Amino acid sequence: VASTRGPVLPDSLVLEIFLRLPHDAVLRAGLTCRQWLAVSRDEFLWRELFYSYYRIPRSVPRHPAAASWYREFRRLFDCIPCVEVQTLREHTDQVLHLAFSHKGHRFSSCSKDCTVKLWDTERLDGNIAMVHSSSMRQFNWGYTQFSQFNADDTLLLVSGVYMGPHHSSSGEIAVISLDNYTLLSRVRNKPYDVFGCWLNETHLISGNLHWIGNMTSCSVLWLNKAFQDVESENVNVVKRLFKIQNVNASTIRTVMVAHCRRHDNPDLLLDYEAQSQARRQKGQQQQQHRPLLFDLGTSGSEEDEDEETGGEEARLPAHRFSQPSMSGLGHVLQSHVAKVMGRAHTKAPDAALMEPSEPGEGEDKTYLLFTTGSLTYSPHQIGIKRIKPDQMTTCGPVLGEERSSDEFFDSLDHVIDIHGHIIGMGLSPDHRYLYVNSRAWPAGCVISDPMSPPPIAEEIDLHVIDLKSLREERRSLRAHRAFTPNDECFFIFLDVSRDFVASGAEDKHGYIWDRHYNICLARLAHDDVVNSVAFSPADQELLLSASDDSTIKVWRSPRMVRLAQAPGRPPRPRSFLPSWLNRGKNSAPSSGVNGKPQAGAGNTGTEQGEEV
């Protein structure tokens, strides 16, 4: 290739050749000589390889924290937790939920076998082992469905479903001490899919439901002390937070708390499309905001999102449902009457509490987030209610702040309509962004009967909502799928790390996306529905997935697997090159990443590797 008089080929020609090669061939060629090594690290070359391999629109800039295109390519290729390193089989029935402690040293799992199990992630041998298991059958639970560690990892909230009639909606929340695994308190929770959550280290939120009519109900959200030993008769163990009217057979479900900081360092750049538009259209009025859409599916048949032209009346319906029956008309009339009467007895919202703030402005805010609805019983809206500082403890009147005799209900401070059935929610680590799984309704559909919601898509949409601007910023379209109909739809838990977002699906796979580029990076195979995924807060290259196949799978990145296989041998500056190149050897073929079939360097390089 090179003689003593210098290179045979000029750098420009070598670069042109490398531009026509796949990335693994470029890396191998770079090992040939010093000239080719230098060209193989060219930034222009890796920018082109990056956009072509990951199929990212060129309007999307490089991540602002990336040092180079070469390192960014390697991050997306080598630091994704896509190698299966362990399978945990201690559960005897479907595993429904996983939750890490805030320190990442433990995690909990809930299952249809009615146990909650605790696991240790810091063993010297690198394997994960169970350290405790508690059965909740003694409390007449049917199964455990959700768990959450409090802020200092000393208490565990466990949510479950009562054993009862087929249509029973009652549940209960238990608080377990992690010092000696004793049960500290039990709290009623209805409906059970409110789940419950921690507000702070010692107080948790539960729900209750009171039906006022066939289509109208009232959801009451309660603040509970985790320690229910009454120190004095003047100390409350519960306090009512909010009392909210529900119409059209809807209820409040899936509550979670977001602590939005005044001064944060956003870990996600969302507005790059709007910024590039502004640069191209200097002097022109800024266009109305629109979410950035990337289609991650393998089919190009999905319809583009209809333009927003105002309210529901301004849309041209692409799909109308049959006229309501007499019972349907009765439902509509009853809901209309309930709305009118409820509006007269609902406390007016305080607009100042929910003013969107720019980064660095305003004050720290605590929001209560939940799913709700106004058109039908299926959850299709995100309700947001700000929790004020004086509501953070159970001190004060048990029924909360004083209301006049005419104000029975609290109003919602903000509502975001998803236009589909919501089946999952998760917060980013900084609580700046809310990620929402939904199954869309047909575009322009009209709901004539609240008890007959529109059919839902099999494809799952992943929405991103900025909790500072209180608007939807981005939507990742149709990478994972679900198949159950409206009345059988169940929750699929997702999780968000600094750089990635992951979700389960009914197609027997978990999925991982990059948050900045909005691309699907990996599929994680199971033998049945994947109900939950969880990133370690201490290391986003460790991911867990839970499935109806009764297993929990542990996934680590190829980089971490290599380091674990060579303990005590410090990595050399270029040691990743041969190992990266050889990842595809002696491994089973995978089913694809980002819509591409895998080959060569796309495999995991371990016997246990399933997907990359």
Image (spheres, rainbow, N blue to C red):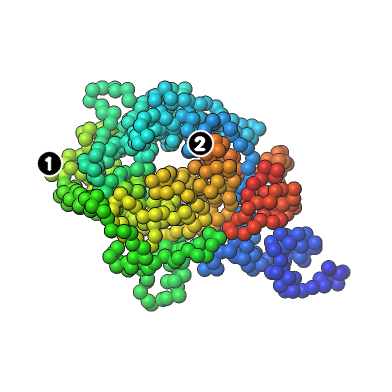
In percent of width and height, residue 268 lies at 47, 56
Q: How many marks?
A: 2
Residue 11, by quadrant, is bottom right
In percent of width and height, residue 17 lies at 73, 71
The residue lying at 52 percent from left, 55 percent from top is: 479
Identify the residue position indicated by label 1 in the image.
405
As measured in the structure, the alpha-carbon distance from the residue carrying label 2 to the one carrying label 1 is 47 Å
Amino acid tagged 2:
Val
Residue 254 visible in the displayed image:
yes
Residue 200 visible in the displayed image:
no
Amino acid tagged 1:
Ser
Q: Is residue 508 left or right of residue 418?
A: right
Label 2 Cα neighbours within 10 Å, binned few <14 / some 14-19 / many ≥20: many
Element assignment for label 2: strand
From the viewer's side, name the closer residue of 54 and 30.
54
Element assignment for label 1: loop
- On screen, residue 175 above or below 219: above
Identify the residue position indicated by label 2 in the image.
95
